[in-house]
Amino acid sequence: MNLLARYAENIFWMARYMERAENLARILDVHETFARDKRGASNWRSIVQLNGDDADFFTRHQKATAETVVHYYVLDQRHPNSLVSIIRMARENARTLRPWISTEMWTQINVLYNRLLELQPKDVTVQHLSRVCAWLKEACQTHTGITEGTFYRDQGWYFYQLGKYIERADQTTRLLDIKYHTLLPASADDGSSLDMFQWFTVLRSAAGYHAFRRVYPRGMTPATVAGFMLYNEGFPRSVVMCVRQIDGVLTRLKSRYSLRRGSEAMEKVDELLGALLSRPIEAVIRDGLHEYLDWVQQQLCSVTDEMGRAFFGQEPAPAIPSPAQSQSQVQAG
């Protein structure tokens, strides 16, 4: 390969971290909306649980309150999956990639990181969280636009796309899981205006409400929302759409650059895509949506492991619970 393995890995993880930051901002934003009702107010711990951070979180905080969870996931520099840490890792990868990425890409990430460092605890209280999350989402989308318009279309572009779509698929499952996990037990509210508002919020957090309404002009149920976010091939953040993109990018990467490695990763992707297309949402919900989403996340981790072995000179990492793998975890493997 003309692109050194370490640069390919840096590009892959820069894309993942930027996508992860946007999705974490979305999860925090939508959870703040849920916390305005009596059920959501006591449910901040679900974010910690579904990101697999219980052990680390409770070594630093006695309770999972709005204040402690928001600080942990926004400003805590000791926490590797806080927004400030995620953007720092994206910036470190971008700095290594200065010869490979545009000046505009580097400048935007650098400015974003420095602005994050300026935030104080008073800036990220629950009352201000929605505004901060909106700014972070816009900054990540700005990065996406700058990358689209300035990143040279060589091997690096393919690895950027792979990182973006693997992370996006993983984060869509987490967003769906955290809200489905929170809402499903409250069957007494099914069909109520509160229930509809909550599912509207789930779709809004994924920028999917208007797309959903194009498919379902009227009505909304947990099954239709879950099915849309998992399987709709016209929605850019659906899991099936992302996995199809991963499959296509891997195929073009191997073909265009005559790469001998990567077949195992492609087999994993094919297996995942086949499983996604073979089961209707009703069967998935009947058999356990949480378990299904957890399996999808494990498969995406396996794809990352196989890519690390094929392209980055890494051994596959052991199975890693949520959140999705980080660069240091893969390298440690």
Image (tube, grey):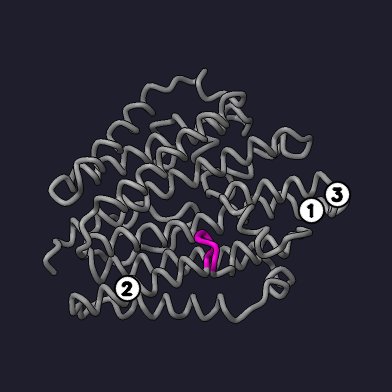
Q: Is residue 200 above or below residue 288?
A: above
Depth check: give the residue in front, 170 or 49: 170
Count the marks: how many? 3
What is the three-letter code of the residue carrying label 1? Answer: Pro
Q: Is residue 267 above or below residue 124?
A: below
| Distance from Cα at disc 2 to Cα at disc 3 | 44 Å
Of the 4 image quadrants, the one containing the C terminus is: bottom left
Residue 235 included in the magenta stretch of the image? yes
Judged from the image, the secondary structure of the residue bearing numbered disc 3 is loop
Seen in the image, is 313 located left or right of residue 317?
left
Q: Earlier in the sequence, mark 2 or mark 3?
A: 3
Label 2 belongs to which residue?
Answer: 250
What is the three-letter code of the residue carrying label 3? Answer: Ser
Few, some or many residues within 10 Å of mark 2 (<14, 14–19, 20+): many
Q: Residue at (72%, 64%) from the top-left corner? A: 223
Q: Residue at (64%, 52%) from the top-left corner? A: 209
Snapshot quadrant of residue 227: bottom right
Q: Percent from the top left, x then y, of residue 180?
A: 69, 55
Q: Earlier in the sequence, mark 3 or mark 1?
A: 1
Label 3 belongs to which residue?
Answer: 192
| Distance from Cα at disc 2 to Cα at disc 1 | 40 Å
Depth check: give the residue in front, 28 or 131: 131
Which numbered disc covers residue 221? Answer: none
Q: Percent from the top left, x then y, of residue 104?
A: 24, 40
Judged from the image, the secondary structure of the residue bearing numbered disc 2 is helix
| Distance from Cα at disc 3 to Cα at disc 1 | 14 Å
Q: Earlier in the sequence, mark 2 or mark 1?
A: 1
What is the three-letter code of the residue carrying label 2? Answer: Leu
Of the 4 image quadrants, the one containing the N terminus is: bottom left
Read off the magenta span. Answer: 234-239
Label 1 belongs to which residue?
Answer: 185
Q: Percent from the top left, x then y, of residue 148?
A: 32, 53
